[in-house]
């Protein structure tokens, strides 16, 4: 359902954008299910599935990963994303969660429902040897340039306007995006 939604919009969706995402989430879900942390919420109307919300709970923290919603035409004017997100919030409250982390990224409906954006920062612990410091700074510069030119400019702005066929994210960008 998640993939169908994004593919109708001409995008790959999470499981195709990120190489090995299916295997990663399957393994993570199995491990967290054993610990009773997995949350897969199904939203329905009668016998019809409207969508899903997938995430985890750790103590009083909810971690919201992905959702999926029906793309049927008769529900096109219904805010299914908001409804599904609201149901996850209700479940989190019932489970006494104090925080819901919807991961990185800015999503209008989450902000309109009272969510806040928090600045993320990286902490680097590097030996004071000049050669190591220079290598780390060069690596971070490379990561920043790759993020800016490949992801923000090409992937996010130019390629969609050119109607270029989407391909999975580059593995080198995935490995470096946390350092940009």
Image: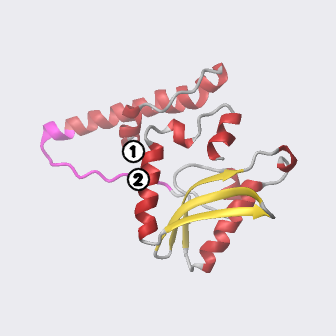
Mark 2: give few (<14), some (14-19) or many (20+) Cα within 10 Å.
Answer: few
x, y percent for residue 60: 50, 76
Secondary structure of the residue carrying numbered label 1: helix
Q: Residue at x 66, y 47 (%)?
A: 1
Give the tally of numbered discs. 2
For marks 2 and 1 on the same chain, the one whose residue lies earlier in the sequence: 2
Which residue is under mark 2? 121
Q: Was residue 87 drawn as part of the magenta stretch in this picture?
A: no
Query: x and y percent of residue 40 in the render?
Result: 58, 63
Which residue is found at the position 55% from the left and 75% from the top? 98
Mark drawn on residue 134? none
For the point 52% across and 36% down, the residue is 17
Q: Would you place residue 54 above or below residue 89 in this image?
A: above
Q: Nearer the viewer, residue 58 or 27?
A: 27
Please state which of residues 156 and 116 is positioned toward the viewer in this rendering.
156
| Side of 95 relative to 42 (left or right) | left
Give the secondary structure at mark 2: loop
Which span is picked out in magenta?
A: 119-133
Q: Can residue 15 be seen by looking at this rendering?
A: yes
């Amino acid at each position: 359902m998640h993939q169908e939604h994004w593919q109708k919009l001409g995008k790959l969706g999470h499981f195709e954008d990120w190489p090995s995402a299916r295997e990663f989430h399957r393994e993570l879900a199995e491990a967290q299910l054993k610990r009773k942390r997995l949350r897969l919420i199904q939203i329905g109307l009668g016998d019809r599935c409207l969508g899903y919300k997938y995430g985890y709970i750790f103590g009083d923290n909810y971690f919201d990963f992905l959702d999926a919603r029906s793309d049927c035409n008769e529900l096109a004017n219904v805010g299914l994303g908001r409804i599904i997100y609201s149901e996850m919030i209700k479940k989190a409250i019932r489970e006494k969660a104090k925080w819901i982390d919807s991961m990185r990224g800015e999503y209008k409906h989450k902000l309109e429902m009272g969510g806040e954006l928090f600045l993320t920062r990286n902490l680097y612990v590097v030996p004071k040897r000049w050669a190591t410091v220079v290598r780390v700074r060069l690596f971070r510069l490379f990561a920043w340039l790759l993020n800016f030119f490949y992801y923000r400019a090409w992937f996010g702005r130019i390629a969609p306007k050119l109607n270029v066929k989407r391909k999975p994210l580059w593995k080198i960008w995935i490995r470096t995006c946390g350092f940009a």
